Image (tube, rainbow, N blue to C red):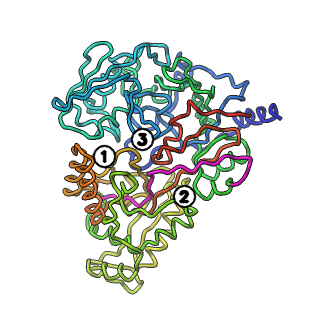
Amino acid sequence: MKNLKVKKVLAVLMAVAMCTGLAACGENSKEDKTSAVTKENESSDTTQKSDDSDMSNTLVYAGENEDSINPVLTNHDELTDIIFSGLMKFDGSGKPVADLAEDYEFDEENLTYKFTLRKGVKWHDGEDFTADDVEFTYKTLTEDDTLSSSVTTDYEDIETITIVDENTVEFKLKNYNANMLGYFTIGIIPKHLLEGKDIATDEFNQNPVGTGRYKFVEWDTTGGMLTLEKNEDYYGKVPNIDRLVYKTVAVESTKATMIQSGEADLAWLNANYAAKFEGNDDYNTWDFKTADYRGASMDMKSDFWKANSDSIGVLNYALDKDAIIKSVLNSQGCAAYSPIQLNPLGTDKEADIYSYDLDKFDEEMKKLGWEKNSDGIYERNGQKFHFTIQTRDYEEERVDIANLMSSMLEKAGVEMEVKLVTKFDWEAGYDGFLAGFATQFDPDMAYKQFVTDGSSNTMSYSNAKVDEYLEAGRRGKTEEERKEAYANFEKEYAKTPGVLLVAYLDGNYVGSKGVEGLDTTRVLGHHAVGVMWNIEEWTITR
């Protein structure tokens, strides 16, 4: 039976070609740049061909679509976290601990971090990891004016980067940043492969070389499959699982089918698909907590919201969020009222100012000057309350959420037109998109999304009070100071939101019976990212 199963998996890997598309959520739109893998890439000296003759210790993962693997461009997916390493890393509780740095010091008076680097660390191509690589990475993030990345706002407090000696790097900050250690978790990139190149388009992004637990082997773009092998020279615990085959899968139902048929060993599934596997002895299921929300993110650059942004918050009264959670999420989640409400420094219930109440909705709409026309649709100043929200057609859960929102709002007298797209189009004139985001570690993760001109603020939201409170949260030196700042942020944002929040999701993973070792301790991020935080401990038995 073992040989039959191995042959079955091999046959699938040879034959199945999955759909490809975008990996990043709409909030990371600046990462939506694809680069084809050239023949030169595929024959690169750093690309090794994997031996697929033995699948007994190979994990097949049905994951997100990918077009680029580079932590400086995207911090959103699983693969960057296991291919690359940072000066710091997040532990199971979501706290930053030393990684490529064996130790660090912080001089609060001089706002200086000093990192002592591990000795003897090798890049996956055999070159030595050095302080030059650290300097190169952070100068790219802070000094490269051509860099288009959603994460650059996280590093704007870095003033200088100094190589003290071959094993020591010093960062001087312009201002105190309470989450700076968290941002030092970003993967370090190799200077010897990227210096002088266009990081956005270089072939490195499809042929990555890191220092992490797994090393890149090959990328079959036709079959939608990436192959990684464990890094035998890893400075920490070398993983138990020899090989990871990462299938890029767009359609949610396809992931469930792959798990059911044995074509994949592990996948994140939406709640309704995951429920079908519960109680079945042939599968393992894991329920993670996430900080991942869903909502309609409004484009403040659109003509409609330029005229009507004062009417976003009131739409909450017209949404039965509990009904959406029950039907679309199979009750695996909770109603959302704040973009940081599941963060320990968030959760101010005074920001939960809306309830499902159609009478209250009508009352508040009239206060804002809206009146229903003969068709039962609200109008103001000769303009119907009609806006468009784009939603990627392959994300069933988001499509279902968007359609239910549209139905509820129409019942209340507002037209939210759902536009299904293959990839988000920021030039098409839509009024927003069905979005997701997460602050699973520190609430300052929301800074770049909501502060005016933040690097992840793709919808151009701006509110001076929100800026003030986010700034106070970033600069706060005590938990009490920061909690107060974020409570103020939550209450101010609730009054003038840019996202019509709906729900937070649980993270439901399903795997074959032989997959063991997943640890549900950590709160996961957007798209339930972070499940591989302890992949070195995982095992698979066929």
Q: Per the image, is 97 magenta?
A: no
In the picture, the quarter occupied by the N terminus is top right
465 to the left or right of 284: left
- N-terminal label among 2 and 1: 2
Say if mark 2 contacts mark 1, CB within 8 Å. no
Alpha carbon of mark 3 to alpha carbon of mark 1: how far? 14 Å
- N-terminal label among 3 and 1: 3
352 to the left or right of 518: left
Q: Per the image, is 289 magenta?
A: yes
- N-terminal label among 2 and 3: 3
- Which mark identifies residue 444? 1
Q: Nearer the viewer, residue 222 or 236?
A: 236
Q: Is residue 60 above or below residue 359?
A: above
Q: Which residues are magenta?
A: 279-300
Task: Name the residue rendered at 21%, 49% in the picture.
Answer: 472
Q: Nearer the viewer, residue 193 or 281?
A: 281
Judged from the image, the secondary structure of the residue bearing numbered disc 2 is helix
- Which mark identifies residue 94? 3
Q: Nearer the viewer, mark 2 or mark 3?
A: 3
Q: Nearer the viewer, mark 2 or mark 1?
A: 1
Q: Position of residue 151 (x, y in %)?
A: 34, 39
Residue 304 seen in render: no
Kindly indicate the quadrant of the structure image that contains residue 204. top left
Task: Name the residue rendered at 70%, 54% in the picture.
Answer: 279
Q: Nearer the viewer, mark 3 or mark 1?
A: 3
Alpha carbon of mark 2 to alpha carbon of mark 3: how far? 27 Å
Q: Position of residue 119 (x, y in %)?
A: 40, 14
Q: Which residue is mark 2?
A: 397
